[in-house]
Amino acid sequence: MALFTAITGLANITGSVLFGILADRIGHRPVLVMASGAGGLACLLIVLFPSLWTVYAAFALTNLCVIGYNLSSGILILEQIPRERLPMGISVNAMITLCVSSIVTIGGSWLADHISFVAVFLIAGLSGLAGAVIIRSGAGKAADAAGDSIKLET
């Protein structure tokens, strides 16, 4: 149990410093892509290489996923949404995050009870990797849409 606490602390410190530097240099969208990819990779490692040491590595990667999300998701919203629509954008993000988290928790519990934990990790891993691809591919489109929205309002 103490090893999980140590992994959490080290992953949080390392992730905060690393993702903070990267966000300053390359932006918040790439940090979200890396964070989502880390979460997806963590789950797939559990499926492909089930062992105690894989669980430790996956735990560190999921901590990196959470750190990257906490650091960059809110700031990305601030950067992408026009100021006058910002309160609604933040509210919608919070609502979607809470609803999806609740649904995923219930669905993951059901899958673990009725199928297996492997199914939970497989779906979570593929979802994390798909999220990384979606965030990465949406970079130009979101910036263009935000720019067009600002142009129309001025």
Image: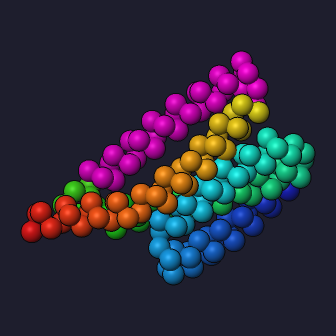
Camera-side residue: 111 or 94?
111
Residue 34 appears anywhere in the view:
yes
Residue 88 at x, y percent in the picture: 26, 50
Work out which quarter of the rendered image holds the C terminus and state it: bottom left
Residue 1 at x, y percent in the picture: 85, 49
Vertically, is 145 above or below 95? Answer: below
Vertically, is 52 above or below 8? Answer: above
User: Main SS of the magenta segment?
Assistant: helix
For residue 99: magenta?
A: yes
Residue at the top extreme, as displayed: 114
The number of discs equals: 0
- Quarter of image, res 149: bottom left
- What residue range appears in magenta? 88-117
- Quarter of image, res 46: top right
Camera-side residue: 10 or 62?
62
Colour setting? rainbow
Q: Which residue is found at the position 65% from the left and 22% from the top?
A: 110
For residue 121: magenta?
A: no
Q: Which residue is found at the position 51% from the left and 81% from the top?
A: 25
